[in-house]
């Protein structure tokens, strides 16, 4: 999209026509999906893709698995639908590209479609500072970045096709959402909100602000839980391994059980950037100076980790008393 000028003359990368096109396309796709619903079987499987990722931030915690939800229609003439979730950042063109790209998931989808006929949706998991390790794939650098993205997508697709541990899930689907508020203390972002640079929903809280957002939880077949989080969350919040007092930036402890234990299911996965984007979500005791770390610059609050953890524990406590 071509950059446009906002009222104060500052160049913005937002393109209103593109945004409207994206919204309308997604809306139509959702309507079409509901109208075309049909019966079938849902399977859950996973594979280790840790060779394709690395964590740039201590403590080193990753979810090593790519999870696949595979829907097999009863109608044999219909294509299968696969939802793949992994915590690997799609930043193959760098952190500030001037090109619009669907990154390696595009090539993952194309490869699987060609080999199986299945349609694929790729969902970001607990990525935070976890990025794709392009040293793990072989490609011709002289052909440019697209070749690199192709190599990564194809390599991960081959791992997806190797999944041999599918478990059929019972036809049980439960979904719940909860509105929550986060008290922002990142003054750079607070200023941006006040100036109208973000379209986040905020409310006054005395002399401060409250950022209004939401979390969600989905359970499939009484076995698989999906935590829907409004940002990029640290994997240690879900799976454990948070910095202890000796390694903590603030010399404090993180006194929350991993969300995977709180959920009480066989496997908890994460759909990140879901329904909102409040920035990076870190453990409170590992919130560092914005002068030293990238994540802190784009985190709404130094308390967003505990806010999310408290809200999730409360949500699970209500639905599983």
Image: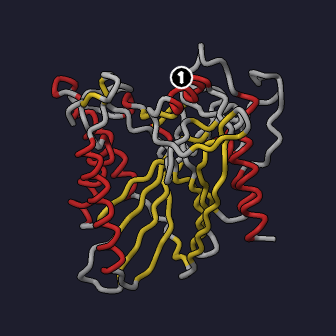
Q: Position of residue 9 (x, y in %)?
A: 30, 22
In the image, taking residue 235 as reference, residue 45 lies left or right, namely left
Q: Position of residue 76 (x, y in %)?
A: 28, 83
Judge by depth and name the residue closer to the eye, 203 or 302.
Answer: 203
The residue lying at 74 percent from left, 42 percent from top is 306
Q: Position of residue 297 (x, y in %)?
A: 56, 24
The residue lying at 57 percent from left, 72 percent from top is 220
The residue lying at 25 percent from left, 37 percent from top is 100
In the image, taking residue 145 as reference, residue 311 lies left or right, namely right
The residue lying at 60 percent from left, 18 percent from top is 290
Q: Secondary structure at mark 1?
A: helix
Quadrant location of the N terminus in the rendered image: top left
Residue behind mark 1: 294
What colouring method underlies this structural image? secondary structure
Residue that protrudes farthest toward the top in the picture = 291
Judge by depth and name the residue closer to the eye, 76 or 94.
Answer: 94
Quadrant location of the C terminus in the rendered image: bottom right
Residue 85 seen in the current view: yes
In the image, taking residue 253 as reference, residue 216 lies left or right, namely left
Q: Position of residue 144 (x, y in %)?
A: 19, 27
| Quadrant in which residue 64 is drawn | top right
Give the vertical position of 233 relative to 189 (above or below).
Answer: below
Judge by depth and name the residue closer to the eye, 114 or 259.
Answer: 259
Give the vertical position of 268 relative to 8 (above or below).
Answer: below
Q: Estimate how packed mark 1 is, as few (under 14), some (14 to 19) or many (20 or more) residues with alpha carbons within 10 Å.
A: few
């Amino acid at each position: 999209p071509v950059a446009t000028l906002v009222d104060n003359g500052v160049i913005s990368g937002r393109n209103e026509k593109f945004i409207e096109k994206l919204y309308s396309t997604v809306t139509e796709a959702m309507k079409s999906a509901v109208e075309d619903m049909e019966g079938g079987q849902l399977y859950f499987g996973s594979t280790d893709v840790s060779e394709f990722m690395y964590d740039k931030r201590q403590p080193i915690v990753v979810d090593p698995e790519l999870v696949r939800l595979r829907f097999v229609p009863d109608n044999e003439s219909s294509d299968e639908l696969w939802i793949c979730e992994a915590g690997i950042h799609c930043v193959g063109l760098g952190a500030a590209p001037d090109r619009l790209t669907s990154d390696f998931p595009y090539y993952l989808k194309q490869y699987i479609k060609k080999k199986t006929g299945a349609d694929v949706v790729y969902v970001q998991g607990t990525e935070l500072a976890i990025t794709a390790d392009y040293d793990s794939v072989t490609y011709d650098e002289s052909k440019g970045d697209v070749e690199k993205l192709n190599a990564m997508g194809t390599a991960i697709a081959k791992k997806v096709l190797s999944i041999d541990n599918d478990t059929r899930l019972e036809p049980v689907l439960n979904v719940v959402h909860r509105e929550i508020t986060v008290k922002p203390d990142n003054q750079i972002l607070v200023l941006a909100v006040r100036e109208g640079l973000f379209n986040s929903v905020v409310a006054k809280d005395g002399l401060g602000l409250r950022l209004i957002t939401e979390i969600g939880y989905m359970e499939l077949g009484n076995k698989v839980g999906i935590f829907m989080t409004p940002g990029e969350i640290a994997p240690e919040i879900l799976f454990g391994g948070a910095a202890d007092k000796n390694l903590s930036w603030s010399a404090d402890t993180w006194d929350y059980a991993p969300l995977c234990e709180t959920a009480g299911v066989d496997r908890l996965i994460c759909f990140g950037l879901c329904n909102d984007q409040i920035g990076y979500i870190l453990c409170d005791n590992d919130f560092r100076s914005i002068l030293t770390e990238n994540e802190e610059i784009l985190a709404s609050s130094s308390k967003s980790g505990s806010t999310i953890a408290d809200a999730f524990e409360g949500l699970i406590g209500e639905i599983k008393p």
